[in-house]
Each structure stands twice: as C-alpha cells, then as structure tokens.
C-alpha cells in the first residue's frame, strides 16, 4: 500500500529533522506506529505519505514514495485527498469551517462531489463512526477530544484507504484518548491502513501491528508488538520511549517532609459572564514541597481553578492566603505562576537571558548571578543568547519556568506540561519539578499523563462539576485509586 | 420565523451597502440604510447582532451630539474619530449578521459560482476563519503578560502574536491542502444554492437603495 524507497530529505532552510536513506513498506490493512524522540523524523514520514512533502513543505528530496499506486513526486496533494486522510496534532489549527457538518463535508465539496452524494457521505460518516451528536455544532464550542473526532470524520468522509495521524493524542485527556482509540480500532476493523506518529504509547498497544523506531532521521528498528514487548525492560527504557504497557508503572515521588500548610484556599468560587458557575466553594491547604495533580474531565473546572489561583480570572470570590497573609486576586499574579501548555505565549524578549531579566520595574530585576544560576540549573546556559522562538518546545517551557524562578514565584501551576513531549523531555520536566519542590515551592500540575503523574506528584486532587471530589496523598496504599481513574 | 437567504444575495447586499456608505449623501440616507439592515437582520433571526449593532450606533450618535454642544479641539478630535467609525458601521452591522448565518463552505461555493477567482476566495475564507482563532491567541498572550506584571506594548504583544498566527496559518493551510482545497475540479456545496422569491425581494430593495443614494439620497426628495 505504501512503499518508501531510499528517501533522503531535509527542509529548505534549516538542516534539522531530515530523513537519511529511509526505506519501508506498509501492507494494506496494517497499523504501523512510528516512534522515537522529538525530531527523529517520524512526522516527516507522515508528510511523505500524504504528499505534503515535497509539495507543501519544500526541501531537498530524493528517493521514491509510492502510495496506493501513486508516485508522490508527480502527484499533487489534492489528487491524494481521496486516498490518504490526515489527522494532525493541534485540533485548533486543522479546521477550515466554523461548524462541524461543514467541516465533515469540506473535502467532498472541494473534490466536487454532487450535493446529494455529500449528504449521504456525511450521514454515513456520522453513523459509521458513532458521532451523530457532534454534527451541526460550533467548532469553537467543542473540546479538544471532540475536535479530534471531527477531524477524523472529515478525513473519513472522503473514504480514503490510508489514514496518517501525527501525534493525535497530544492535546487530549484520558477519556478522549479512549474514545480516539475506539474510533481508530473501527477504522482498522474496516480494513483501513493506519500510520501513527506518537509519543504516548499505552493507548496504542491493542491497535498496532508494528513499531518502527526512528533515530536521527533513520529507521533503527522495526518490531512487531510481541517482539517489542519481549525485549528486556532495560532495552525498552533505553530507547527513550513512553511506556507501552502502563502496568509496569508505579508512584515514585516521595511525600514531602513538612506538613505545615503554607498555602490555604477557602471557599473559592468562580463564574463566567452569563452567571455560569464553574468553581464551587473550593477549599484546601497545601504544604511547601507538595506536588499536587489536578485531575478531572472536560469542564470539571481545572483550567479555571488554575486561572483563578493566579489571579487571571476576575469573576471569583473566596480567600487565598500564603503563609497566613491573605492575597487579593490581583496581587497573586506572579507569586502564583502559571506555566502554560504552550509556553511560547509567555516569552516576550529576544533572548533567553533577557527573558529572565525582564521585569515590571528596575527594582524587581533579578541579579545577574541569580539568573546564571537559574539558567545553569535548567540546563539553558548554552542557549542564553538564543531567541526564545527558535527553541524547542521543552526548552521554551524551561525558559518560562526560569522566569518564574527568577521572580520568586511561590506557587507554580503547570498546565499539561508533558503534552507532546517525548520520554527524555518528560523526565526533564520531572527533574525540574523535583528542583522546585526541594526549594520549598508548591507545585500544581494539570495533567492527563499517567506516566508524569506517577513520576512527579505527591498528591491527587480530582475536580468534578467545579467541586473537589477526592483529595488524597499519592502513596503506595492509595495507588489503586489512581489506577481505577485511568482504567 | 427566520428566513435563510442565498449567500450570493448576502454578498451582493454587502457590496451594495458599501456603495451606499461611499455615496452617503446625507445622514437621513444613512439612517434609512441602517434601518433596512436592522429589518433584514430581524428577518434572518440575528437578534443579538441586531441589538448590539443598534446600541453601538446609538452610542456613537449620542457622543457626537454631546461633542456638538462643546466646541473645542478635544471634542473636534473625538467627533472626527467617531465619524470615521460611524462610516463603516453599516458594513460591520450587516457583516456580523452575514457571518452568523453563513457557513464558510457556502460562502466559498457562492463566491465560486460568481466566478470569483480562487486566489481571492481562499485568502478571504481563511481570513474569516481566522478571527476567532486570533482572539483566542490574543487573550492567552494578555494573560501571560499579566502574570509577568508587564504592561501592554506593541512589541511585546503583537510580535509574539504574529509569530504564533503565522504558525497556525501554516498548519491550517497544510490541513486544507490534504483535504483537496487546491483541487482543480469545480467545487460543490452540500447545501444547494437556489435563488428564491425572498432573495430577489431583498436584492431588489437594496439595489434600489444603492441607486437612490448614488442619485443624491433623501435630500433629492426635497429638491
């Protein structure tokens, strides 16, 4: 179905992320996982298959790619639209329409199918994938998971034989990942060929037939799932991959030594303009050195809690205090620091070092020694003169954390810090969090990442409908509770 | 009961409103135009856009009236600024209703059936699609600035925003290319376009209004 022969490629201007003499064959109906560290070339392979390379992303290309009988080099991507369906990483930037039905019909309309046929296809797609409830909705009102299902539907409507997925689960919570996995299983059962580039592996164990492991633009290994699982554990972890089998994981973060609450929240509520209440009467206390996971489904109030704590959400009532001193919402911004999921938003200057120095007034500017110590501790010293926008995702994130450290933030809240990160970068986040807790900071992590949760968190707080449903320390005795949530 | 108008008629009306505003002989004609748009929005069931638009417009008129009472440099400056915005009000007013009732796919097909070239259609629709995204991006950057205690500045807000938007625009284009946006085949629309009686009626009414204002507007009636 897909033949890639001796392909070498690098992107126009930059020399990074190339492919070196890559060859692989994928049979009809196979489900292949492309895995490896960030920048290993797995996304590039998906772009070879849907024709974005060499037609959309230009660069130096040699070799041959044949997809369902089409030679990619001489086939325009629109001629492939009915053969290869693509689903991308970021649900926010893959929709052309503002409504879901229009989006599902979009490809058919582009290819000039008759209106009656398009109607039939839209209905067949919705029924076949079980997403009737998602038709006729406003795209901006959907959750990330729902958007991803619509993205699959809009590819499915063109009835392609091949689907390529580029990190489809990066922005999804665990329920949504479950839904996604179910849907992909349906595609597989319908005999479609699936090619998936992914970091998070656990949800794919049931689905995939083969694992293609890439490193520095080369295919290093090509295993069947059973071959991979029979590798000795040490060899598996040496590959720098996320766990395929989550049952081998267990909590590893030690409980904090101190037990005097430093931060107290009492009766915190928050609402939106139209009177819609999103947080109801939240109360808890936290000690320095605690790392608290905030869990909950879509709409449970996780993001609003983070924004309310940091003083970014105006419509709130209740009290928040640090060390016995009550802080108004406005004065919390900065002392409570939010590390956003896309930390690129948080960087404003032209170099990493200037980013640390940037402050609201001359008086609050950190000293040069302090900045260089922080850069050193985050392994950013080598990058101190680089423009923040030229950094990788993990480096941007560490720079954002650095600015919080430079300005003496006491409470750090991470929003999905490991989304889209490979194993190595995820471990680096864990190490930075360890560092923060050893300095006596209080850390919150909004996450859907089971691996990160077990590696970094000491306590679990679950929100439901804007209230705290459960709050327990993450110890060996309580481990089964977490397992239940993620099963 | 709400009426669904053909997107082609809506685009035509948008152009005609611009003609009216451009010719804009007098205030009375402008009011007439606003009134007709208000009726049209009511027919299309856009109550929110209708009330918001009229409120903003009334507010502008109010401030203009107050400025007229005092004659100094400041009020002259304020009224000039407001007059500029008032001039585009009818277009914005109708466009808000147009966007609320028209799907992007319909708009693309409508423009194509009017033989608008693809090099115009695609950027136009991408721009429409882009406003809500740009708003989300902008509020995230403002949040980030607040966390750092930074005041709003062009350099620090707009440049990161433009970089991010460029990124999103590229991803968006890649996604639409894989869905065949560049296909040479004639595009179809799931919702078939038919001109019906109400389309002709509103079309004729707005053509008449445009002709009327080019000829001199309400003032002509008084000789």
Image (spheres, coloured by chain):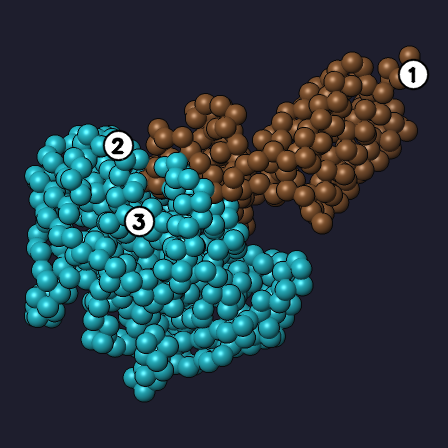
- Front one among A318 and A210: A210
Asked whether the beta carbons under mark 2 and mark 1 sit within 8 Å of each other, the answer is no
Q: Name the residue under label 2.
A: A76
Q: Residue A38, position in %: x, y?
A: 23, 50
Q: Give the left or right position of residue A356, taking residue A220 as reference.
A: right
Viewer-nearest of labels 2 and 3? 3
Structural crowding at the residue carrying mark 3, measured as other residues with C-alpha within 10 Å and reported as few (<14), some (14–19) or many (≥20): some
Q: Residue B52, position in %: x, y?
A: 73, 44
Instruction: Work out which residue is located at the far bottom of the displayed protein and give it.
Output: A477
Query: If you read the primary sequence from the N terminus, does the residue marked by circle 2 or circle 3 appear first?
Result: 2
* Residue A20 can be seen in this image: no
Q: The cyan chain is which one?
A: A
Q: Which residue is drawn at 47% across and 65% down?
A: A298
- Front one among A351 and B114: B114
Q: Mark 1 lies on which chain?
A: B
Structural crowding at the residue carrying mark 1, measured as other residues with C-alpha within 10 Å and reported as few (<14), some (14–19) or many (≥20): few
Q: The brown chain is which one?
A: B
Q: Residue A394, position in %: x, y?
A: 30, 52
Q: Indicate whether A386 appears above or below B15.
A: below
Q: Name the residue under label 1.
A: B222
- Front one among A383 and A145: A145
Q: Mark 3 lies on which chain?
A: A
Viewer-nearest of labels 1 and 3? 3
Q: Give the left or right position of residue A107, taking residue B107 as reference.
A: left
Asked whether the beta carbons under mark 1 and mark 3 sit within 8 Å of each other, the answer is no
Q: Which residue is drawn at 62% across and 31% down?
A: B9
Q: Name the residue under label 3.
A: A159
Provide the secondary structure element on which disc 2 rests.
loop
Provide the secondary structure element on which disc 3 rests.
loop
């Amino acid at each position: 179905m897909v033949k890639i022969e001796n392909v070498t490629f690098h992107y126009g201007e930059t020399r990074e992320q190339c492919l070196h003499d890559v060859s692989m064959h994928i049979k009809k109906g196979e489900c292949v996982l492309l895995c490896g560290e960030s920048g290993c070339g797995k996304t590039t392979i998906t772009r070879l298959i849907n024709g974005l390379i060499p037609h959309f992303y230009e660069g130096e290309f040699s070799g041959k790619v044949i997809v369902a009988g089409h030679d990619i080099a001489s086939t325009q991507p629109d001629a492939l639209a009915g053969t290869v369906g693509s689903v991308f990483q970021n649900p926010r930037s893959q929709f052309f329409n503002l409504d879901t039905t229009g989006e599902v019909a979009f490809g058919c309309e582009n290819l000039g199918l008759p209106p009656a046929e398009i109607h039939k296809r839209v209905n067949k797609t919705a029924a076949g994938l079980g997403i009737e409830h998602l038709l006729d909705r406003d795209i901006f009102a959907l959750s990330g998971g729902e958007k991803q299902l619509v993205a699959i539907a809009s590819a499915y409507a063109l009835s392609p034989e091949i689907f390529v997925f580029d990190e489809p689960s990066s922005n999804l919570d665990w329920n949504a990942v479950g839904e996604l996995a179910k849907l992909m299983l349906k595609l597989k059962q319908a005999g479609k060929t699936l090619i998936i580039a992914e970091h998070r592996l656990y949800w794919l164990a049931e689905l995939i037939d083969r694992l293609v492991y890439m490193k520095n633009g080369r295919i290093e290994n090509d295993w069947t799932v059973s071959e991979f699982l029979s590798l000795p554990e040490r060899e598996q972890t040496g590959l720098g991959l996320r766990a395929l089998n989550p049952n081998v994981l267990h909590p590893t973060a030690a409980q904090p030594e101190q037990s005097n609450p430093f931060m107290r929240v009492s009766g915190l509520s928050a609402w939106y303009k139209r009177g819609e209440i999103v947080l109801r009467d939240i109360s808890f206390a936290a000690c320095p050195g605690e790392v608290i996971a905030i869990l909950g489904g879509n709409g449970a109030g996780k993001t609003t809690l983070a924004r309310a704590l940091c003083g970014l959400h105006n419509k709130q009532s209740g009290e928040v205090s640090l060390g016995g001193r009550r802080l108004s919402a406005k004065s919390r911004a900065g002392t409570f620091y939010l590390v956003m999921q896309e930390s690129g938003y948080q960087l404003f200057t032209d170099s990493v070092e200037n980013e640390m120095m940037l402050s609201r007034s001359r008086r609050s500017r950190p000293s040069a020694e302090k900045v260089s110590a922080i850069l050193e501790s985050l392994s950013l010293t080598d990058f101190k003169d680089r423009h923040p926008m030229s950094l990788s995702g993990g480096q941007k994130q560490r720079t954002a954390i650095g600015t919080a450290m430079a300005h003496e933030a006491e409470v750090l809240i991470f929003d999905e810090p490991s989304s889209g990160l490979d194993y190595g970068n995820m471990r680096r986040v864990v190490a930075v969090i360890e560092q923060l807790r050893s300095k006596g900071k209080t850390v919150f992590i909004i996450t859907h990442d089971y691996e990160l949760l077990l590696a970094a968190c000491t306590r679990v707080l679950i929100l439901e409908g804007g209230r705290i449903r459960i709050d327990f320390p993450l110890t060996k005795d309580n481990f089964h509770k977490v397992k239940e949530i993620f099963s | 009961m709400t009426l669904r108008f053909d997107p082609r008629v809506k685009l035509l009306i948008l152009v005609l409103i611009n003609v009216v505003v451009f010719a804009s002989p007098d205030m009375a004609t402008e009011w007439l135009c606003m009134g007709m748009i208000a009726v049209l929005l009511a027919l299309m069931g856009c109550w929110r856009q209708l009330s918001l638009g009229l409120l903003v417009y009334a507010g502008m008129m109010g401030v203009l009236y107050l400025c007229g009472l005092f004659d100094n440099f400041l009020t002259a400056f304020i009224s000039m600024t407001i007059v500029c915005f008032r001039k585009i009000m009818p277009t914005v007013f109708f466009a808000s209703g147009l966007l609320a009732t028209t799907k992007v796919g319909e708009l693309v097909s409508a423009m194509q059936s009017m033989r608008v070239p693809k090099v115009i259609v695609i950027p136009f629709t991408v721009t429409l699609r882009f406003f809500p995204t740009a708003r989300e991006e902008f509020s995230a950057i403002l949040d980030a600035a607040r966390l750092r205690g930074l005041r709003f500045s062009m350099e620090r807000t707009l440049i990161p925003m433009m970089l991010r938007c460029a990124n999103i625009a590229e991803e968006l284009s890649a996604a639409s290319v894989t869905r065949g946006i560049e296909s040479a085949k004639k595009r179809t629309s799931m919702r078939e376009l038919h001109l019906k009686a109400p389309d002709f009626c509103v079309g004729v009414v707005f053509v008449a209004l445009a002709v009327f204002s080019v000829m001199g507007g309400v003032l002509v009636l008084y000789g």
